[in-house]
């Protein structure tokens, strides 16, 4: 009788544990990429590289793994941190291998599927072509692509993961970049208070923030176009000019001198410091620049010449609005955490 | 019985129908084809290029050794004397030739229809359509994870079409650590979204004598001389000291114009 009770208990336990595993089966609960309905059409060609659980997991593992760098010390996640919307927390310019410094501020990574250009100068036209840049950059990860591929091929865990995700027997360049794109394309930010407001909850923004929103629509939205807060174009915003030629580096045209890609302003409260050179430490400094510190120059955008004429109060109101673009859900989503 | 008969009838009709659908066997016999080998020999003016150890000089008396001389050849077209031509298919028309790798200097073009050929045309570089394709369509010579790893710009997506790297010759007792290498990395396919530099160049070479490709020959070969010195000479004389580094700048178009003329036919073997 006692044996029977034990048997029953075991049976119960087995059934229960199976029920549990069924409920949390990650394959079944993984949703893949879903575009928010109020966003424009995606630019990334998902039919060539659809997001699936195996590819996403692999991309995430690669993103946080120092194996991508020459000496194992730097991962993508070292410079792209979730709490800063995947920008480099509190770094003006990027800080890579052997403590070497780059010349640009690491930008946020979010809503990449809508991006037309990558890097501040837009030199890279496809998300899949991005990873080779930091991986082989001597001041970032300083690895050689064939060497990285043989390190990954020598690692049985990675071999198995690539097999599962891409049905490839060995790791190749195309699958490596596709896996990283699957992870990055899932970094969707659309759950800020502003998004709640757009979905019809009019009390999601305070009166002050709504005034800021109006000012933003008048003064800023032509470049930082909602809902992605970028026009996917390049402008010279009259910062101090430097040796960094911006868009002209890749187009080799004088008319593109000192123009940089309009960054998205989602989560901008958390992604300081600002601009391609990271010289503006605070949003107050950025707004002051737009109000009255635009430097003259032949390629400066005509909308900005002479400044935007914002009062101190208006600057504060715009900042209050910008802070409603903070998406805490995204910044803490455990699916994306190391 | 009747039912069986009608079933058989249906079956018969189906068989006849499908038999008719079968593609007709070709009335004309398949064109006979064969392989042509193309051999690239690298020179500096009239002497065969030797990497690293041999001293060379340009026409303005600047002395140097050559470390690296690599370039892409693509989109090959072979023209017959009757005016028709054979276009090498996309899946097998990209080649990376490296002076450090003998095997890369011999390429085989297979499945060429037999006939009398008199001209070859090709592109130096990689066309914009292929340059913009996803990595999975850029394999073989174009694989940036392997063969093409050092022939790719990662900051401005695209292939480097031609690389020439030289070192100045330091006089005995001179300070070799101060030597600045001469680096010419030429690329630029014209840009995807905005027009930018287009350094794609086409080369047309007449054979002089014809190459008569027959079915059972094993020797058909086009031998081409590539004179690396012409990268730096021609319509623009490159001053190594004034322009020691050229990458994606307007000046790079001059170098592309120079090297467009670096090839010549030295031998046609039937």
Image: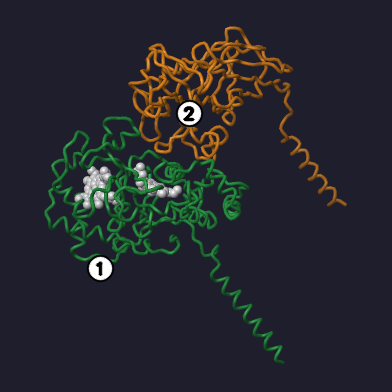
Chain colours: A green, B orange
Could one spot residue B270 in this view of the protein? yes
Q: On the picture, is B32 further left or further right than A286?
A: right
Residue extending farthest bottom: A1
Residue extending farthest right: B1
- Crowding near the residue tagged with mark 2, few <14, some 14–19, many ≥20 C-alpha atoms within 10 Å: many
**Relative to B176, is A117 above or below?**
below
**Relative to B93, is A18 above or below?**
below
Mark toward the viewer: 1 or 2 = 2
In which quadrant is the C terminus of chain A drawn?
Answer: bottom left
Please tell me which residue lies in front, B264 or A300.
B264
**Residue matched to label 2:** B127
Marking on residue B58: none
Residue A297: image x %, image y %?
A: 18, 35
Residue A157: image x %, image y %?
A: 58, 55
Q: On the picture, is A106 further left or further right than B40?
A: left
Q: Chain of mark 2?
A: B
Residue at disc 2, secondary structure: loop
Residue extending farthest top: B209
Q: On the picture, is A249 further left or further right than B28?
A: left
In which quadrant is the N terminus of chain A drawn?
Answer: bottom right
On whether disc 1 and disc 2 are found on a single subunit, the reply is no
* Res. B63 image quadrant: top left
**Residue matched to label 1:** A203
Q: Chain of mark 1?
A: A
Please tell me which residue lies in front, B218 or A317.
B218
Picture residue at 56% right of the left edge, 12% below the top: B265
């Amino acid at each position: 009788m006692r044996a029977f009770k034990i048997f029953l208990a075991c049976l119960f336990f087995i059934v229960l544990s199976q029920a549990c595993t069924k409920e949390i089966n990650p394959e079944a609960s993984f949703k893949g990429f879903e575009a928010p309905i109020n966003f424009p059409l995606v630019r990334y060609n998902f039919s060539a590289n659809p997001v699936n659980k195996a590819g996403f997991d692999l991309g995430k593992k690669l993103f946080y793994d120092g194996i991508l760098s020459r000496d194992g010390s730097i991962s993508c996640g070292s410079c792209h941190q979730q709490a800063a919307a995947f920008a480099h927390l509190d770094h003006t310019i990027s800080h890579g291998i052997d403590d070497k410094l780059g010349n640009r501020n690491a930008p946020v990574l979010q809503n990449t599927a809508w991006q037309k250009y990558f890097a501040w100068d837009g030199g890279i036209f496809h998300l899949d072509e991005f990873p080779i840049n930091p991986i082989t950059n001597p001041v970032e990860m300083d690895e050689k692509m064939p060497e990285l591929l043989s390190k990954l091929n020598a690692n049985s865990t990675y071999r198995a993961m690539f097999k599962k995700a891409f049905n490839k027997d060995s790791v190749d360049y195309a699958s490596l970049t596709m896996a990283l794109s699957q992870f990055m394309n899932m970094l969707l930010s659309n759950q800020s208070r502003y998004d709640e407001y757009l979905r019809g909850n009019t009390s999601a923004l305070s009166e002050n923030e709504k005034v800021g929103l109006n000012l933003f629509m008048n003064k800023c939205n032509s470049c930082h176009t909602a809902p992605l807060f970028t026009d996917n174009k390049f402008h010279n915003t009259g910062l101090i000019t430097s040796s960094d030629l911006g868009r002209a580096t890749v187009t080799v045209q004088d008319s593109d001198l000192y123009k940089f890609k309009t960054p998205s302003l989602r989560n901008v409260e958390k992604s300081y410091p600002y601009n391609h050179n990271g010289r503006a430490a605070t949003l107050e400094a950025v707004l002051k620049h737009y109000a009255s510190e635009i430097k003259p120059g032949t390629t400066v955008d005509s909308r900005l010449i002479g400044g935007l004429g914002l009062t101190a109060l208006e600057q504060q109101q715009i900042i209050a609005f910008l802070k409603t673009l903070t998406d805490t859900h995204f910044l803490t989503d455990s699916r994306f955490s190391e | 019985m009747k039912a069986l008969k009608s079933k058989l009838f249906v079956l018969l009709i189906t068989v006849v129908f499908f038999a008719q659908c079968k593609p007709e066997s070709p009335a004309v016999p398949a064109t006979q084809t064969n392989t042509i080998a193309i051999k690239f020999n690298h020179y500096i003016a009239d002497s065969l290029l030797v990497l690293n150890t041999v001293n060379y000089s340009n026409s303005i008396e600047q002395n140097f050794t050559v470390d690296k001389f690599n370039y892409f050849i693509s989109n090959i077209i072979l023209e017959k004397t009757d005016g028709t031509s054979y276009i090498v298919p996309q899946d097998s028309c990209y080649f990376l030739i490296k002076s450090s790798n003998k095997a890369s200097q011999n390429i085989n073009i297979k499945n060429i229809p037999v006939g009398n050929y008199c001209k070859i045309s090709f592109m130096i570089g990689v066309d914009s359509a292929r340059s913009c394709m996803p990595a999975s369509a850029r394999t073989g010579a174009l694989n940036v994870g392997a063969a093409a790893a050092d022939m790719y710009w990662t900051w401005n997506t695209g292939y480097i079409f031609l690389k020439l790297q030289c070192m100045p010759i330091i006089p005995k007792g001179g300070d070799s650590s101060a030597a600045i290498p001469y680096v010419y990395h030429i690329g630029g396919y014209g840009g995807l979204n905005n027009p930018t530099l287009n350094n794609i160049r086409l080369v047309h070479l007449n054979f002089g004598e014809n190459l008569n490709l027959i079915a059972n020959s094993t020797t058909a070969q086009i031998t081409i001389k590539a004179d690396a010195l012409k990268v730096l000479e021609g319509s623009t004389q490159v001053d190594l000291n004034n322009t020691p580094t050229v990458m994606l700048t307007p000046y790079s178009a001059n170098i592309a114009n120079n090297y467009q003329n670096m090839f010549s036919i030295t031998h046609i073997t039937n």
